[in-house]
Image (cartoon, rainbow, N blue to C red):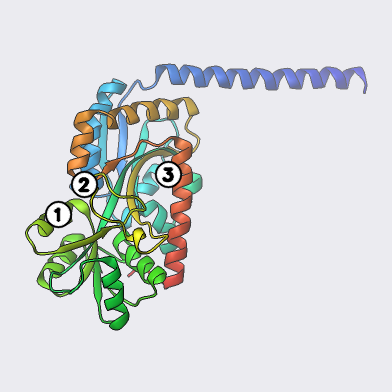
Amino acid sequence: MDAFATRSSVRTVALLASMWGASILANDATAQTYPNRPIRCIIPYIAGSSTDVVGRIVGPKLSERLGQAVVIDNRGGANSIIGTEMAVRSLPDGYTILLGATALATNPSMYKLPYDAAKAFSPITQTVAVHLLLVVHPSLPVRTVAELITLAKARPGQLTYGSSSTGSPGHLAGELLQNLAGIKLVHVPYKGGPQATADLIGGQIQLQFDPIATSLPHIKAGKARALAVSSAKRSTILPDMPTIAETVPGFNMVGWQGFLVPAGTPSEIIQRLHREIVAVFALPEVRQRIFDLGYETVGSSPREFAEFMRADTAQFARIISGAGIRPE
């Protein structure tokens, strides 16, 4: 190699090292000054939705810890796709965060999306787990999951179950139960959980997978009967309630919520957001309010949340593909 080439190589290496060092210093400076203006929290659901309620519980506490306002921005519509795409297109600077939910894992198998959530976002933490209750109308002569399976096998295609919509966790829970237990149920989709619950209470449908909080009042009033919880482990909210998995091994269906940021957000900012969000959800008053909603707090690491989302997306893909589910 001649002297000119050697000098050129040295200058190139020096330039790259300088750029790399400048990038590190810039990231450090950004992390040290972050945040210095309000943070927008996109919630891809309408005001009053379960995700919105959680966001508004934690928003003020997170503002206190970050020293900047956390502004809730509801962008509902298209099964959360509209708000999620808006977050995807935001700058990866930590000033836009997304409070997403289970649809992030179901939508890839249901729709042709303008983004790939697995690549478009950096997970921060799963915040809550939403366990479902398998509930039946009191007239149905069953009190356990085993009895329900026996009845369903004796009446194939005659028992109906409702859900808030096609592709919702309640719908997919029913498909998973059919697959694992070898039974045939008839799915009845509604335009929202309350309508499905109203028809369950009225006896128009026989069963439903419904969040714990919305089921409990009807169970206590004797208008519905709970058989089991949908999570692999028993819920801390109803520790005496058996799981479906205790009768049907491998059954696990849990809704969830969690915070994410656009991919490319500096790791130092992700770490800061993770630390503060987990601290907020650990506050006794926040934990109690989340518990009162019928949810359980989680607080996973970014890596754990990423792995959880990958596994959940894969499970939903198998269910949706196997059942031939299409959006309506």
**Mark seen at residue 294:** 2
- Circle 3 sits on which residue? 88
Mark 1 crowd level (few <14, some 14–19, many ≥20, 10 Å Cα) = some
The three-letter amino acid code for the residue at tag 1 is: Leu
Can you name the residue that lies furthest to the right here? 2
Q: Secondary structure at mark 2?
A: loop
| Quarter of the image where the C terminus is located | bottom left
**Mark seen at residue 116:** none
Q: Is residue 182 left or right of residue 280?
A: right
The three-letter amino acid code for the residue at tag 2 is: Gly
Location of residue 45 in the rendering, given as x and y in whole percent from the top left corner:
26, 49
Tell me where residue 61 sits by quadrant: top left
**On screen, residue 19 above or below 144:** above
Location of residue 315 in the rendering, given as x and y in whole percent from the top left corner:
45, 58
- Circle 1 sits on which residue? 216
**On screen, residue 228 above or below 296:** below
Assess whether mark 1 and mark 2 are in contact (beta carbons under 8 angstroms): yes
| Quarter of the image where the N terminus is located | top right
Q: Secondary structure at mark 3?
A: helix
Location of residue 137 in the rendering, given as x and y in whole percent from the top left corner:
15, 69
